[in-house]
């Protein structure tokens, strides 16, 4: 991550670590829903999902070990959250 990437993205590598960790964690898991994977495997999207799956197959293990875990989001566990509906 060099100065140009920092300048044009507006983020440092450290600021992106939680996002990177979430993406790698998601990609190393078995597919729960293939909709997004199938959508982005087309040429129109530059076969992004195929590229990501292949990359993670080669590098996912080392990425999981080298990344620090993301900071906790909120104080509720996912099973404790509720959705309020507005009538």
Image (tube, rainbow, N blue to C red):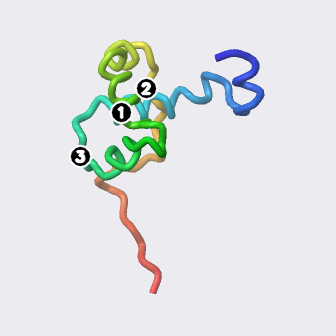
Badge nearest the viewer, 2 or 1: 1
Q: Which mark is residue 32?
A: 3
Q: Are marks 2 and 3 in contact (CB under 8 Å)?
A: no
Dot 3: few (<14), some (14–19), or many (≥20) neighbours within 10 Å? few
Work out whether 20 lies above or below 63: below
Near-viewer residue (54 or 56): 54
Q: Is residue 43 left or right of residue 28?
A: right
Q: Secondary structure at mark 3?
A: loop
Q: Which mark is residue 69?
A: 2
**The N terminus is located in which quarter?**
top right
Q: Is residue 74 left or right of residue 50?
A: right
Badge nearest the viewer, 3 or 1: 1
Q: Secondary structure at mark 1?
A: helix
Q: Which mark is residue 29?
A: none
**Residue for point 32% across, 47% down:** 38
Residue 2: name its quadrant. top right
C-alpha span from label 3 to label 1: 16 Å
Question: Residue 33: image x %, image y %?
Answer: 26, 50
- In terms of sequence position, does the residue under pointer 2 or pointer 1 come before the other? 1
Dot 1: few (<14), some (14–19), or many (≥20) neighbours within 10 Å? some
Question: Residue 5: image x %, image y %?
Answer: 70, 24
- In terms of sequence position, does the residue under pointer 3 or pointer 1 come before the other? 3
Work out whether 10 lies above or below 68: below
C-alpha span from label 2 to label 1: 25 Å
**The C terminus is located in which quarter?**
bottom left
Q: Which residue is mark 1?
A: 50
Q: Secondary structure at mark 2?
A: loop
Work out whether 67 lies above or below 18: above
Q: Is residue 14 left or right of residue 56?
A: right
**Residue for point 44% across, 29% down:** 21
């Amino acid at each position: 991550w060099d100065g140009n990437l920092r300048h044009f993205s507006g983020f440092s590598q450290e600021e992106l670590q939680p996002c990177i960790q979430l993406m790698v964690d998601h990609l190393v898991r078995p597919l729960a829903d293939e909709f997004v994977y199938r959508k982005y495997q087309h040429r129109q999207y530059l076969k992004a999902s195929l590229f990501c799956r292949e990359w993670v197959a080669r590098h996912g293990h080392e990425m999981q070990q080298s990344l620090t875990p993301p900071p906790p989001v909120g104080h509720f566990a996912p099973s404790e959250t509720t959705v309020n509906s507005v009538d």
